[in-house]
Amino acid sequence: MKRLKLSVLPMLFAFSSLLTACNQDSKDIILDGISIGDQATEVKLKAISADNKTSTGVHLSGGITDLDNNYAITDIGFVISSGNNQPDTSDLIYSFGKASMTFTFDSTIIDLSPNTVYYARTYVLTSKGAGYGNVLAFQTSESPADVIVINEGNFSSGDGSFSTYNSLTNEVSLSVFAAANGFPVAGTVQNARVFNGNIYATTNDADKLEVFDQETFVSKAYINSGLNSPFDFAAIGDKGYVTNWGTLNYDTYAWENSFIAVVDLKTNTISNTINLEEQPQHILAVGNSFYVANVSGNTISVYSANDDSKQADISVSAGPDNMVLDKGGNIWVMCTSGNLVQIDPSSNSVIKTISNVQNSGYNEKLTIDAKGENIYYLASSGWPDYNTNIYSISIDVTEVSKDPVISGTNYYGIGVSPGGMIYVSDANAFQGNGTVYTYDLKGNQIETFAAGRGPNGFIFR
């Protein structure tokens, strides 16, 4: 008998069990006379049922409604198989243990294979043999695309888009937003963030905040007034912050009249504006505070989500840009000056600064793995060669490695999937559409797939 052990089985089962005295509802189907060996018994089971089927999981329910004093139940639970249409205790087992009373039980089973037929039934194990309930056949759904590619588009064209990639089937769908809505994004997508099941995309040319469903890509709302070169978005509760560069002074090439637009997420309207003295870049929500990187200066400004008041200015290296959170809840900031700064948000103080970081010097691309332990970032030589490297650094070290994990040209975006794959986008010098490469954590290339123009980031779901 293969009893479920998470450490050894190739499939993982997450569960929530409900053990309650059984109330024999007249609507329940009761299976009489469960046989153990060749002997009919008085052991009775509820018919197994399934609901909440997904591409990788199912919720199973069952129960025992009568016992038999001649057959002490030493184990009871579910057996499941994708190959055996009469699953037994030689297949995968989810055990609820010994049964000395009637009760109902349920389990949510995960990590099944998409678009696959499975067979499940309740088993009863006694010292005299095993008995089984009815067989239930169910099929998992097809696997949805698990990677969303953010395609920035060409600035002068406003042809940003969103595409998807299914890492199980390698299927690519270009322009999924346009396909879902019948109209394109019609903007240059700077960033896109997920919050409460929605994607909030900041675009310029045209300046707007586009709000659409994370799963269906159907547009829910958009804000196209009160913004001026919006760049990034973060949210807490019913409040969102959008950083805005403002207006470019073509004499000094500095951004002026920068501000933060405060968004009421219940009405998708701008409720407040916070004027800034410096150009903001990325923004990060931590606890009940927003952390804004002032890329034209050397501070991270902290604002309260309660009343939009500034709580602190944290002095860091010049050009604070992209930010991520590590497993300890600390903030990491990549600065355009070639420094990586770790901040403790509980005290709003700098923990450490790592110098001599090879980066891009502008529009820094930074991400962290699902465990929050290793940071990945992109370094570019810039014009005219645009040689690019992907580096990795552990949050525990104080020096960076000079050896890149991945090397290439025209890399423009980076992401690390929850499964531990590195996704790197190639903008192909914006000469047509881009390309995405996937690598394992050692830098071995795995797959290549097409993207839209200027792919600059990824959303994993």
Image: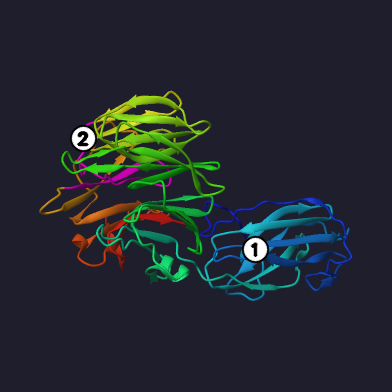
Q: Does residue 217 appear left or right of residue 381 in this picture?
A: right
Mark yes or no: residue 39 visible: yes
Residue 197, labelled with which disc?
none
Question: What residue sits 81% from the left and 50% below the top?
Answer: 20
Q: Position of residue 45 (x, y in %)?
A: 81, 65
Asked whether residue 365 is drawn in magenta, I would say: yes
What's the residue type where badge 2 is placed? Ser
Q: Residues within 10 Å of mark 1 (few under 14, many from 20)?
A: few
Q: Does residue 18 appear left or right of residue 66 in this picture?
A: left
Report which residue position mark 1 lands on.
Answer: 52
- What kind of element bears circle 2? loop
242, above or below 81, in the image: above
417, above or below 363, in the image: below
**From which residue to which does the magenta span run?**
355-380
Q: Could you tell me which quadrant the N terminus lies in?
A: bottom right
Q: Position of residue 382 (x, y in %)?
A: 15, 49
319, above or below 21, in the image: above
Q: Position of residue 368 (x, y in %)?
A: 37, 44
What's the residue type where badge 1 is placed? Asn
Question: Seen from this angle, which residue lies furthest left?
Answer: 384
Report which residue position mark 2 lands on.
Answer: 337
Mark pair 2, 1: CA separation: 50 Å
Residue in the foreground of this view, choosing between 203 and 373: 203
Question: What residue sits 27% from the left and 31% below the top?
Answer: 398
Question: What residue sits 52% from the left and 67% below the top?
Answer: 113
Q: Does residue 71 appear left or right of residue 5 in this picture?
A: right
- Mainly helix, strand or loop, the magenta region? loop
Mark yes or no: residue 1 visible: no
Please tell me in which quadrant of the rendered image residue 47 appears.
Answer: bottom right
Looking at the rendered structure, the number of numbered marks drawn on it comes to 2
